[in-house]
Amino acid sequence: MAIALRGILCLKGKCVENEVDGLLYRGSEVILLEAKHHANPHTKTSLDIPREAQSIIEDVVEGYELGYPSVKLTGNLIVCNTKLTDQAVQYANCRGSRFISWKHPLGHGLENLIEEHNVYPTTLLQEVNETIEAALGDAGIVSLEQLAADDSSNLARRSGIDKAKLQGLIKRLDSPLNTQRSKLERSSDCFSASVFLLPHICRSSQSSSA
């Protein structure tokens, strides 16, 4: 089944305007996407995140009934780059929220999807510092696959990064990704590439909740 994604947008609820990270469309479903990134990979995603997502759904659904937003939300999906607290898991399960996080659901966690679909972030290259990461991101490049597929001259113009520097980064991609995978476990930045996994994340959340 085809899956479509709309990025950050505001939805008018009964009470307030709600900024959401995205909407996923799958068949007749319209799924609220809540994305949470922690710079510290040891920081767990707390109860506040699924509770906030639930409050947004309730407000937007009530707003839809009053004729405000043009979409009717049917559920939510929480994606985060760290583990969830036990309370967060308990609340999400109770409310019927689907979620993908580090090591959860078992066998379908974010790290499994990254490795299964070979979507690795540019930050796995040691040469990519915060400045280069930001410049690449502004040019629409967050994964190693994108970096390898892009034209260095074109990318240099879009990103402002020196062409020789980009060619050096691309040359580094010739080394097997296996040499980088040892960093995956401790790399919280893997989340930056997960936007390309959203169709797989959505399917995974469906199968793991079945």
Image (cartoon, grey):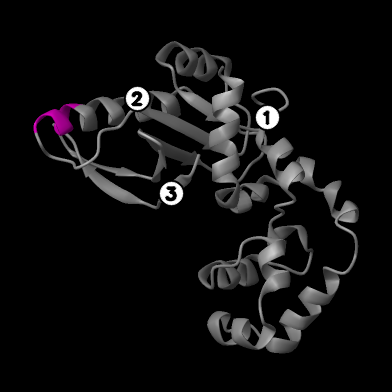
Query: Are there few (<14), some (14-19), or many (20+) residues within 10 Å of tag 2?
Result: many
Please name the residue shown 61% across and 33% down the image.
43
Q: Quadrant of residue 23?
A: top left
Please name the residue shown 39% across and 46% down the image.
22
Q: Is residue 113 left or right of residue 205?
A: right
The amino acid type, in three-letter code, at marker 3 is Leu
Q: What is the spatial separation of the Cα atoms under label 3 and label 1, in whole angstroms? A: 20 Å
Q: Is residue 141 left or right of residue 4?
A: right
Work out whether mark 1 precedes mark 2 in sequence or the reverse, and give the earlier one: 2
Please name the residue shown 57% across and 84% down the image.
160
Please name the residue shown 84% across and 48% down the image.
181
The span picked out in magenta is 62-66
The amino acid type, in three-letter code, at marker 1 is His
Q: What is the spatial separation of the Cα atoms under label 2 and label 3, in whole angstroms? A: 20 Å
Residue depth check, mark 2 versus mark 3: number of the one nearer the observer: 3
In this view of the protein, which residue sits in the foreground, 16 or 141?
Answer: 141
The residue where tag 1 is placed is 108
